[in-house]
Image: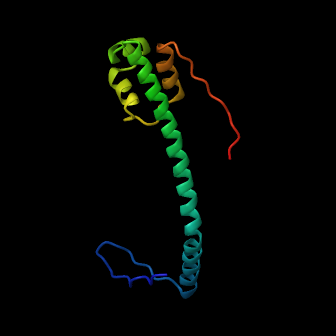
Amino acid sequence: MAKSKPLVPKPNRIITTHTPQHEAELRELRDKLDAEKPQLIAEARAKHLITKRRRAKLAEIFIELKSERLKRGLSLADLAQRTGMAREVIYRLENQVTPNPTIGTVQRYAEALDLEVRLELVKAS
C-alpha cells in the first residue's frame, strides 16, 4: 500500500488531523478495499461483457431491420412517415449511434415493416 503524502495547507481549505485511532481505522478500511479490489474489477468486467453481448444482439436486430427496409425499397423518410419517428432517429438506430433504444422503439420500427418483435425469458447462467 502506498504511503499517504503529508498534508500541505492550501488556501481556503480546512485540514483536519486524525487521531491515531482514526488513522488506524482508515488504514484498515483502505486495506479491506485493496483486498476486495480484484474481485470488484472481475465483477465489473463480467457485467461489461454481458452489456457488450446485449448491444451486439441489438445491433444484429437493427442490421436485419435495415436490410428488410432496403429490400422493400423504403427510404428513411418513408419509414419515418410510417413510424412517426424522425428520419435522423431511424438513421441513428440503424447505425448504432443510439445504442440503447426502448423496446417500444424497436417495436415501432418492426411494425412499420409488418414484422413482429418477440421477447423470451431464459434462465440466467
> In this view, which residue lies farthest toward the right?
123
Q: Nearer the viewer, residue 58 or 43?
A: 58
Residue reaching furthest bottom? 20
Residue at the location (38% across, 82% down)? 7
Which percent across, then down, holds residue 107? 52, 21
Q: Using residue 40 as the reference point, say whether residue 88 is left or right of it.
A: left
Residue 10 location (% of width, % of height): 30, 76
47 or 13: nearer the viewer: 47
**As drawn, 69 above or below 36:** above
Taking the spot 53% from the left edge, 16% from the top edge, the residue there is 115
Q: How many marks?
A: 0
Which residue occupies 33% across, 82% down? Answer: 8
**Which quadrant of the figure has residue 16?**
bottom left
- Horizontal and vertical percent position of residue 44: 54, 56
Way the structure is coloured = rainbow
Closer-to-camera residue (33/22): 33
Tell me if 10 is positioned left or right of 51 in this view: left
Outermost residue toward the left in this view: 11
Q: In the drawing, does residue 23 fall left or right of residue 122?
A: left
Q: Is residue 102 above or below residue 25?
A: above
**Rendered residue at 59%/69% (across/down):** 36
